[in-house]
Image (tube, rainbow, N blue to C red):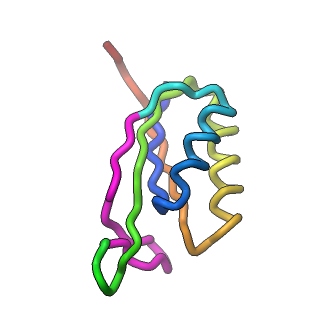
Amino acid sequence: MKAVFIAFNQGNTERMEYLLDRLEIRGYTMWEQVHGRGTNDGEPRHGSHTWPEMNNSMLVVVEDEKVPELLAKLRLLDHRNLEMGVRAFVWNIEQTV
């Protein structure tokens, strides 16, 4: 199994939930109002007067074979509007309860 951490502009929240439904990924944990800034050229998201936008983030745990399709769909969403930004990071899950 793999854990996929996804950070995205809060404007993409409904799209993210729709994407997970379409991929039949049921379980996730979401954090709202997440502060951050993109690695290369992303604008800060601080919910302030200067930087008013915010991010949300999700953690999904999926079977290994679902990861490539999930990442491909996230890339498409990211390229749809580069200024909104979507990033995903994958790591192994060793054990679960």
Magenta stretch holds residue 71: no
Residue 33: x, y in percent? 32, 58
* Highlighted magenta segment, given as a residue range: 29-46
Which quadrant of the figure has residue 17? top right
Is 31 rendered above or below residue 64?
below
Left or right: 97 as drawn, with respect to 62: left
Left or right: 35 as drawn, with respect to 3: left
Which quadrant of the figure has residue 20? top right
Residue 70: x, y in percent? 64, 40
Left or right: 90 as drawn, with respect to 23: left
Task: Residue at 44% x, 38% y: name it.
Answer: 91
Is 47 rendered above or below residue 91?
below
How many marks can you see?
Answer: 0
Task: Residue at 37% x, 72% y: name it.
Answer: 45
Q: Main secondary structure of the magenta part?
A: loop
Quadrant, the C terminus: top left
Task: Residue at 70% x, 64% y: name it.
Answer: 80
Is 43 rendered above or below residue 60?
below
Which quadrant of the figure has residue 81? bottom right
Seen from the viewer's position, the closer of residues 8 and 87 is 8
Residue 18: x, y in percent? 62, 40
Which residue is at the far top? 97
Is 83 rendered above or below residue 5?
below
Magenta stretch holds residue 42: yes
Residue 15: x, y in percent? 61, 49
